[in-house]
Structure formats: C-alpha cells, structure tokens
C-alpha cells in the first residue's frame, strides 16, 4: 500500500490548482503596480525585480545553462528581443501605467493579449483567422476601447485617453509579440529559457534604472515598496513561472493557456478588495466584451 501523498505533492500534481494560483499571482501584479505608486519608482521596481530573480535562477539552473549555452548563443538575438519586450518593457510600462490608471483597467486590458496574439500569429506566420475568430477579435477590441474611454464615446471621438491606459495597451501589444515569438524558441527546458530571458531583462533594465536616477525620478523605496518588491519577485516572477511550467507538463500548453483568461477576472476583484477601487458599469461591460471576444475567438472553426 502506497503512503498518502503530502499536501505539497497533491498541489504539485494538480494542474488546475497550479494554474489558478498562477493567474491569481499575475492578477496580483496589476494590484502591486498600483500599490507601488509613491513607494517605489517604476524602473527601480522593474530593475530590482530582475536583479533578485537573477540572484536565484542562474544559480539553480547553472548546469542547464552550461549544457544549453551553445544553443542560447546561436539564438542570442531571439533571447535578447524576447527578454527585452516580454519582461523588461511589459513590466516597466505596466508600472508606469499605474500612475494614471486603475488596477481594474490594467487587469481588464490584459485580457486583450490573447486576441493580439491571434493577430500577431497571422502577421508572423500567416496563421489563418476564421470568421468566428475575426468576430472575437472585434468584440475584444471593442472591450478594450470601452475600458480606455471609460465608457464615454466622446473620449473616442476626441482621442483623449488617459495615458496609463495607452501605456497598458502598448504593453499588451509587446507581450503579445513576445508570446508569438516564444512559440519558435529553441528546444530546451522552459525554465532554462526563462532564466536566460530573465538575465537579459536584468541587463536591459540597468540603463533604464540609471536614466531614472539621472533624471531625479528615482527614490529610496519605503517599507511598503520593499514588501511590494518581495511579492513581485516571489510571486509573479518565480512561483508563477514554476507553477505554469509544471501545469504545462501535466496537461499541455493548449489547455493551460486558456487559464490566462482568468487574469482580467481576478484583477478587478483584487483591486476592489485590496485597493478599494470602485467597479463602474463600463467595467462590467468591458469585461464581458473582452472575455466574450476571447471565448468566441477560441471556438473551433
């Protein structure tokens, strides 16, 4: 008779629980970006995040990095671009966006990433887009416009959007490009490739941190700022990556990827509970359009 599995073992074997925890941590990153305002500067948070990640990951996976170094070296440009746009640029723009928009908007706008990926795959690989997928893309983009305009059509006509919403849309476009690009990553364990990209993100963030210091925008983090940094490193940067990779091992990338749609659901809930932000009618409409568009786009042709 086999001994009963321990609680950590049962959690590690449950893909759906791991994916739920992953998306909850990612949604928490939207809330953390808003909490960080006034407590830790955007580039300081981005740079220290990857510095601390690189203090752990390269050591843990040093043997794998040495083993796959020839492949990484041969694909240095791809590793550099993916690490720069997917990690440094996306997170920097999210943290900057938080200075002028809400965590609810940041979370809902992240729901646009799957349809941007669909469009990116069409542009990069000519992956065909069916009628339902095109409809789904249109509905989701409408949801993004509702979010960015705060439900006011006059804003659309005057193109007077809040800067934070525009920064977040650009961040989502960059992350969609990262997602499309990572489909053709060289064959190696996912965590080894993640570690290589994290090292790139760390190096790329340092000049941006220097610029923040030189312009006088940087400041020493408060206690809250340090706590936010610890959460961002342990949660969205490390634990979620381990959970997501493990879930992919258990049920495959296709089924695991669908759970990313939980991020725009969890983020508004966390923003209300933690930050006390208020849900407006346009938030509900935008969320319904974004999630509805994703659902339509993922239907089989």
Image (spheres, rainbow, N blue to C red):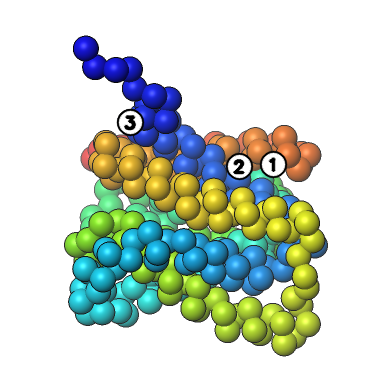
Task: Answer yes or no: is residue 120 visible.
Answer: no
Instruction: Give how far across and how far down residue 242 sits, in percent.
Output: 40, 47
Q: Quadrant of residue 196?
A: bottom left
Residue positioned most to the top: 1
Foreground label between 1 and 3: 3
Question: Which residue position holds label 1?
Answer: 271
Mark 2, Cα crowd under 10 Å, few <14 / some 14-19 / many 20+, is: many
Which numbered disc, 3 or 2, marks the residue closer to the eye? 3
Q: Nearer the viewer, residue 17 or 224?
A: 224
From the viewer's perspective, tell me whether residue 62 is left or right of residue 18. Answer: left
On the image, the x and y values in percent for residue 204 come to: 50, 78
Which residue is painted at 33% across and 66% down in the image? 62
Q: Residues within 10 Å of mark 1 (few under 14, many from 20)?
A: many
Q: Which residue is mark 3?
A: 13
Residue nearer the viewer, 292 or 21: 21
Residue 267's label in the rendered image is 2
Q: CA distance from mark 1 to mark 2?
A: 6 Å
Front residue of this view, candidates 209 and 12: 12
Q: Quadrant of residue 64?
A: bottom left
Name the residue located 27 percent from the left edge and 64 percent from the top edge.
63
Q: Please provide percent x and percent y for residue 209.
A: 63, 78
Res. 118 in view: yes
Compared across the picture, whether 168 is left or right of 15 comes to right
* Residue occupying image coordinates x 76% and y 43%: 275
């Amino acid at each position: 008779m086999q001994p009963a599995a321990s609680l950590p073992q049962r959690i590690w074997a449950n893909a759906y629980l791991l994916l739920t925890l992953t998306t909850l941590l990612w949604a928490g990153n939207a809330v953390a970006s808003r909490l960080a305002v006034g407590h830790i500067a955007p580039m300081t948070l981005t740079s220290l995040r990857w510095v601390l990640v690189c203090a752990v990951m390269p050591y843990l996976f040093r043997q794998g990095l040495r083993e796959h170094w020839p492949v990484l070296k041969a694909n240095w440009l791809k590793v550099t671009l993916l690490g720069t746009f997917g990690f440094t640029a996306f997170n920097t723009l999210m943290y900057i966006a938080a200075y002028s928009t809400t965590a609810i908007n940041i979370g809902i706008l992240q729901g646009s990433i799957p349809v941007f990926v669909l469009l990116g795959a069409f542009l990069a690989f000519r992956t065909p887009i069916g009628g339902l997928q095109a409809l789904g893309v249109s509905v989701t983009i409408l949801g993004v416009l509702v979010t960015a305009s705060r439900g006011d059509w006059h804003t659309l006509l005057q193109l007077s959007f809040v800067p934070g919403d525009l920064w977040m849309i650009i961040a989502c476009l960059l992350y969609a490009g990262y997602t499309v690009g990572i489909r053709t990553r060289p064959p190696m364990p996912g965590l080894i490739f993640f570690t290589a990209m994290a090292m790139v993100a760390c190096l790329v963030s340092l000049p941006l941190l220097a610029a923040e210091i030189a312009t006088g925008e940087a400041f020493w983090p408060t206690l809250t700022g340090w706590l936010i940094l610890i959460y961002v490193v342990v949660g969205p940067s490390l634990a979620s990556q381990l959970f997501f990779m493990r879930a992919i091992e258990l049920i495959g990338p296709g089924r695991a990827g669908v759970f990313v749609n939980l991020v725009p659901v969890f983020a508004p809930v966390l923003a209300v509970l933690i930050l006390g932000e208020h849900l407006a009618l346009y938030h509900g409409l935008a969320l319904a359009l974004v999630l509805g568009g994703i659902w339509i786009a993922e239907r089989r042709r």
